[in-house]
């Protein structure tokens, strides 16, 4: 049915408990386009999201909550918008009506307010800090939450709203020598990146 382009709607009945998540995980694995699953409310969406992450992992399954009164929700919303804007394949987004009712920025505005950096790229560090400041990022001694950046010698630490961990960007002169994510508490590196997209709070 997924290969038949004339089929617009597939109705599935009798899916109880985690059967819906199991069936949906197969759809996500077979199809290359993003899937959006809209559940009845926050609680239903939470259970469905948990089941899907057990099957597919957390890398491709994203949760799109309401931003109401919680900064962590704004981070999750911004991550979803950022990754959709990149055109990633095989994404699975779980949400609910209250979350979808809130307005989001346009694709053009998201693109205009995304700072992209790649290893090997030559860029003036003053330009980067000026852009971060214009995006509303706060200058601090050490980053510990999204929306902050710090500068120490040839290193810029920045916590994007579209990332679970902050980025450490190391320069050699005006060249981006390395980019890594790191733990806030221990300051230890986690993962090397070839490039990153730094996004302000747009959700």
Image: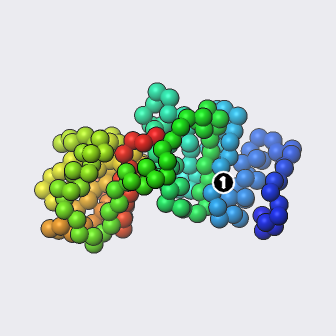
Residue at 50% in and 33% down = 67
Residue at 82% in and 64% down = 6
- The answer to which image quadrant residue 171 occupies is bottom left
The N terminus, quarter of image: bottom right
Using the image, determine if residue 52 lies above or below residue 180: above
Q: Secondary structure at mark 1?
A: strand
The residue at which mark 1 appears reads as 35
- The answer to which image quadrant residue 189 occupies is bottom left
Residue 65 position in % (x across, y down): 55, 37
Q: Nearer the viewer, residue 169 or 191?
A: 169
In the rendered image, the residue lying farthest to the left is 153
In the rendered image, the residue lying farthest to the bottom is 120
The answer to whether residue 52 is left or right of residue 163 is: right
Classify 10 Å Cα crowding around label 1: few (below 14), some (14-19), many (20 and above): some
- The answer to which image quadrant residue 125 occupies is bottom left
Residue 68 position in % (x across, y down): 50, 29
Residue 191 position in % (x across, y down): 37, 61
Using the image, determine if residue 194 lies above or below residue 25: below
Q: Nearer the viewer, residue 190 or 49?
A: 49
Residue 195 position in % (x across, y down): 36, 65
């Amino acid at each position: 049915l997924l290969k038949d382009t004339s089929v617009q709607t597939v109705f599935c009945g009798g899916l109880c408990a985690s059967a819906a998540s199991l069936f949906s995980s197969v759809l996500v694995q077979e199809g290359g386009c993003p899937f959006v699953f809209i559940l009845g409310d926050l609680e239903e969406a939470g259970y469905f999201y948990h089941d899907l992450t057990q099957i597919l992992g957390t890398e491709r399954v994203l949760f799109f909550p309401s931003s109401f009164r919680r900064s962590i929700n704004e981070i999750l919303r911004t991550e979803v918008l950022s990754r959709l804007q990149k055109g990633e394949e095989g994404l699975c987004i779980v949400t609910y009506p209250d979350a979808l009712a809130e307005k989001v920025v346009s694709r053009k505005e998201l693109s205009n307010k995304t700072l992209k950096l790649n290893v090997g790229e030559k860029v003036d560090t003053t330009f980067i800090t000026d852009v971060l400041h214009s995006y509303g990022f706060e200058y601090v001694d050490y980053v510990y939450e999204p929306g902050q950046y710090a500068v120490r010698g040839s290193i810029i630490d920045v916590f994007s709203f579209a990332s679970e961990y902050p980025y450490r960007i190391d320069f050699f002169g005006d060249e981006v020598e390395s980019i890594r994510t790191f733990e806030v508490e221990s300051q230890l590196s986690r993962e090397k990146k070839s490039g990153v997209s730094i996004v302000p709070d747009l959700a």
